[in-house]
Image: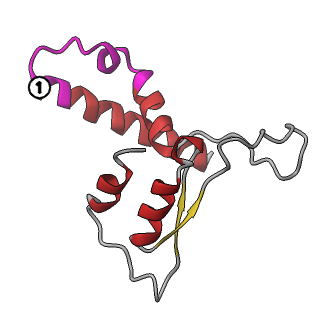
């Protein structure tokens, strides 16, 4: 919550102007503070965050969003399946980078096979 403004200021790719395309920012309950909402609005975002005190809807409620893993979490779980990358047996950084690159190639290859088959 305290670092949201710094995170939004440190983006690498410039976003389009809010006048041309609306920029939505989806946040979880950990950011449900007025300071976070103001920080997002000052930077041209439309913040979406659940109320901190509101109870979660029942799992059968159509207003409840299905649970999804974030893109980064999915990527980490794919790489964690490779024990040499997960435990980091390689002593040198170049060897470790090589194992990470091999793992990435295997992940992409498996995904391509899954989509083509």
Judged left or right of residue 101, residue 36 is right
Along the line of sight, the residue nearer the viewer: 99 or 21: 21
Residue 50 in percent (x, y) is at 66, 50
What residue appears at the point 9 percent right and 20 percent down from the top-left corner? Answer: 92
Residue 73 in percent (x, y) is at 48, 36
The quarter of the picture where the C terminus appears is top right
Residue 27 in percent (x, y) is at 55, 51
What residue appears at the point 29 percent right and 67 percent down from the top-left corner? Answer: 13
Q: Quadrant of residue 53?
A: top right
The quarter of the picture where the N terminus appears is top left
Q: Is residue 40 above or below residue 94?
A: below
Q: In the image as oriented, which residue stretches furthest toward the bottom? A: 20
Magenta stretch encompasses residue 46: no
Q: In the image as oriented, which residue stretches furthest toward the right? A: 60
Q: Magenta region: which residues? A: 80-97
Q: Is residue 99 above or below residue 55?
A: above
Q: Which residue is mark 1?
A: 93
Q: Few, some or many C-alpha atoms within 10 Å of disc 1 (few <14, some 14-19, many ≥20)?
A: few
What residue appears at the point 87 percent right and 38 percent down from the top-left corner? Answer: 58
Judged left or right of residue 13, residue 110 is right
Q: In the image as oriented, which residue stretches furthest toward the front? A: 34
Residue 62 in percent (x, y) is at 88, 51
Along the line of sight, the residue nearer the viewer: 4 or 24: 4
């Amino acid at each position: 919550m305290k670092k949201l403004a710094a995170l939004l200021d440190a983006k690498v790719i410039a976003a389009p102007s809010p006048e041309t395309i609306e920029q939505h920012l989806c946040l979880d309950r950990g950011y449900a503070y007025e300071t976070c909402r103001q920080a997002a609005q000052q930077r041209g975002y439309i913040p979406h965050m659940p109320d901190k005190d509101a109870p979660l809807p029942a799992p059968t409620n159509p207003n409840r969003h299905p649970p999804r893993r974030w893109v980064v979490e999915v990527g980490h779980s794919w790489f964690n399946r490779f024990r040499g990358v997960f435990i980091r047996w390689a002593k040198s950084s170049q060897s470790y980078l090589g194992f990470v690159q091999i793992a990435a190639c295997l992940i992409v290859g498996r995904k391509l096979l899954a989509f083509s088959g």
